[in-house]
Every structure is written in structure tokens, then in C-alpha cells.
Image: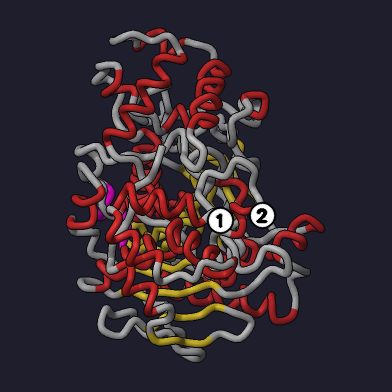
Amino acid sequence: MDALTVETGSGPVRGSVACAGVRKWMGIPFARAPRFAAPEPHPGWSDVRDATRAGPQCPQMFGSKAKRARMAEPDFSEECLSLNIYAPATQGDEKLPVYVWIHGGAFLAGGGAAYDGSLMAQTGHCLVVTINYRLGVLGFVDFGDALGLPDIPSNLGLGDQIAALRWVRDNIAAFGGDPEKVTIGGQSAGSMSVSLLMLAQGAWPLFRGAIMQSGAVSLIHSRETAQRIARRYAELLDLNQGDLEKLRTMPLRRLFEAQGTVDAETPGGIPAAPWYDGDLLPESLAAAQAAPTAPVPLIAGAAREESRLFELMPGSILPTRRAEVAERLTGGLGEAAAGEILAAYPDNKAGNRALASDFSFGMPTRNFAERHAAHQPTWFYRFDYSHPIAGATHGLDLTLTWPMKGLRAALARGGPMKGKRAALGGRMIDHYAHFVRDLTPVLPRGAEWPQYRPNERKVKIFALADRVETDPDAERVAAWAGRDVGSRG
């Protein structure tokens, strides 16, 4: 076989050559996904499979309007469990480390093919794998418990992610990757997924390192919330106890119409998300906070103004106003603790924005890293580069580290990818790639990045001119005192 034709456990695939000679294989099935069933091995194929184009994304809808649901083939299909692999142009006989990327999108939208791994693969001299997983009503609704259907496993979308990691373990060597050197990473819902995989039964030791960009375990539904939401879906879909066949055969659009209704009924919440099930995951947020995480090195961090993106989104899935955050804090922690936290944030535009940013992503990610740092090497960052309109907001870091072209991309990142902006993106990629290779982001030559330790709290500040600060936002961190608030649905 030539360098682009690879034999996998399911059959041969033929890829293509991308920019700078990077080799890529797109749309490789890693499992089958019968509706509301656990992922199962793909039956395979005998002829060489064309892997030059991305496979379909999983059906999805973001927001409450069902007319925006995306499920039309060939771009979207329930047979969507595929992954994409990027490898450097040349690598010799050495087996290279592997970076598995889990996309974000509030567990409702997105797909692996949106992330071009060519740049990371070539400059970082590693393999990059991006994956799909089931989303929304198809991946994260607790129909099993709500309808008395033990045949429906919990947290199907997370099960898909674990199935992808198992496929990587079993097949990545054929592409030149080292199955013993896998790092997982993700942003937003992808970062939350990484934190959950660090707690999930059966996920570790499928990876040896983790990178979390804006998101952690606290923004997940409780079992009670998940069952309440699932019962509402059952009402909308006219489902009775044991209606498995009806659930699996009803039109896809009807499922998304129900998701849209649930979404409209839960402002500031998510209509389908992972939940603490006492099976794949711990039974509660408190149990997750107390449970040992995977014994692997970790990079974690968040943007300085996470909430600004959600201020611009109608019908936001997260609270952005002080009163909304205060209500959630009081409901989750009680009046006394909520008062202590609120007192650390001035009641003005900047203070309220910092409060919403810390509530949603900043403190959950920081608290997870702090707990992990007590036992494993951990590095923490804050992303401070500021978009001229949206500030240092949620997701802006992605525009600097994943190739994005065209006017829309330039607008998203705040300008063309050149000069200091390009240099910042390059430094971030170098740190991440070095971590994937050597389990430390500290470069042989370059700016420092000390480990994060609970007694020091050294934080890397990513900006047009990077720096390291000791315990930034110390008053706010002290007010939270490691406390997290569970998700609202």
C-alpha cells in the first residue's frame, strides 16, 4: 500500500494530501450508532474506502426554532460516528504522539470536521484526530430512566467519545501514531467532556494527558434535572413507559421539535446535556468533586471575558445579568455563600461581566484544575487577547489555534492572522504541541509557564505579550472558595 492507503480494523481507507504536504483521512467510521443505543463496532468494508471528504455531521439544532434543525443528508445523518486524522508530511519510522480533539457547541451542535488539524499536525509533529459524537436529543436525554428503558444507556454522546478513543487505541498505529501517547483536548462543551472523561468509567487509561479550554464538570445536569427534562420530552412526544420502538422510529424532525420546545421553556439552560448518572459518571456534582480524576497531567484555562459572547446571543444558554447569576448562586449554594461571592464583584458593567464569566466557565475550570493540581502536574492559563468588539470572549482562542480563512474568519478573530496576533496563536500551538509530545507545556527555549500549585497559583496570561501572574483575581477566587454550581435545565 502507498502512504495514503491504510489498513484499519474495519477495512482499508485512502486519504489525501492537504496543505504543506500534511496527510489526512476524513470521515472514517469508528462505530455505528443505532438510535438510542450504545455505539457498537462498525461492520466494516472490504474495498478501499474513500477518506478524502468529511463524513456527515450528527443531526443537530441550536436554539428553539425547529426549522433551524440540521438533519438533511448527505451533510447530516444519524450514521455520523466518524473521525478525521491529520498526520505530518513526513515522520520516518517514529510513532508520533496523538491529540484527540473534542468539539464544543453546548452539546447541541458542531462537528469534528470544522477543525482543521493540519497546522497542529505539521508544526507540532504529532497526529491530530477530530471526532463526531451524538448531540442534543439524540445524545444527551435520559430516556432510559424516564421511560423505564434499560436498553437505552445513559450519556450516549459521552459513550461515543469513549468509543472513538478505543478506536484510536486499536488503529492509530497504522497511521503512524503511538496509542500509548494520546492526549485529549476540547473547548467549551468539549472541555467539559474532557473533564467528564477524566472521571468516567472506562475512559482512562485511553489517554495520558488532557487539555481543557473553558469548561468543567459543574455545568452538567443533576440526575433529578435530567429525569425531569426527559419526562417533559416524553410528554411532548406522547411516549409511555416502555415505548422504545416508537422512540426509535418516530420522524427525526419530531424529536427536534420537542428539543426546541424544551429549549424555549428553559431560558438560561440547556435542553440536552450530560448528567451525573451514577453509572458512567459519578452520581452527583459533589461526588464528582470528591472523586479521583485520571492520574494524568493537565492544561486548563479560560478566557478573561467568557460571557461577552453570550451577551450577543438572543435566548442565551447561560445567564449574563447579575440578577440571573445571583438567582442561580442562591439556588445552588444558599444565600450566605451567594452573598459572599456577589460581594467580590462590583455592581457595574465590568463587575457583572466578570461575575457572569466566572460563573459560567472561569471558576468551574479553575476549581477543577485546583483540585487536580493537588495530585497531578497541572498548568493553568487565562486568555486575555481582546477582540475589538467582543473582548476576550468565549471561543476567541480557537480562532488563533485552528486554521480559519476568509473575511468571516478575520472578523471572528478581530483581524487578519498576521503580526502579533499570528505570533500569539503560534505560541499557544507550540505550548499545546509540546504538552502532547512531552506532557509539559514548558518549551526548551521561550517564556516560562510554571506549574499551577494550590499554594502559589501561577497563571500563564496569553496576550499579545504573554506574562505569568501569581494568583490573579485572588479576591474572586477566595470568595468562591472552590464552590461550584450545577447546571440548570
Of residues 146 and 179, the one drawn nearer to the viewer in this rendering: 146
Q: Return the residue at label 1.
A: 86
Determine if the magenta segment contains residue 346. no
- Which region of the structure is painted magenta? 203-209
Chain-order first, disc 1 or disc 2: 2
Q: Which mark is residue 457?
A: none
Q: Position of residue 374 (x, y in %)?
A: 22, 73
Cα distance between the residues tagged 1 and 2? 10 Å
Vertical position of residue 141 compared to residue 24: above or below: above
- The picture quadrant where one finds residue 296 is bottom left
Q: Is residue 44 left or right of residue 1?
A: left
Q: Provide the major secondary structure of the magenta segment.
A: loop
Residue type highlighted by circle 2: Val
* Mark 1 neighbour density, 10 Å: few (under 14) some (14–19) many (20 or more): many
Which residue has dot 2 on it?
17
Q: Residue at x 21, y 51 (%)?
A: 286
Q: Amino acid at mark 1?
A: Tyr
Q: Secondary structure at mark 1?
A: strand
Task: Give the quarter of the figure containing the C terminus.
Answer: top left
Tell me: residue 284, above or below residue 468: above
Query: Where does residue 377 sit, x and y in percent of width and height?
Result: 28, 75
- How many neighbours does mark 2 have within 10 angstroms: few (below 14), some (14-19), or many (20 or more)? some
Q: Secondary structure at mark 2?
A: strand
Q: Nearer the viewer, mark 1 or mark 2?
A: 1
Can residue 442 be seen in this snapshot? yes
Dividing the picture into quarters, in which one does residue 420 lie? bottom right
Colouring? secondary structure
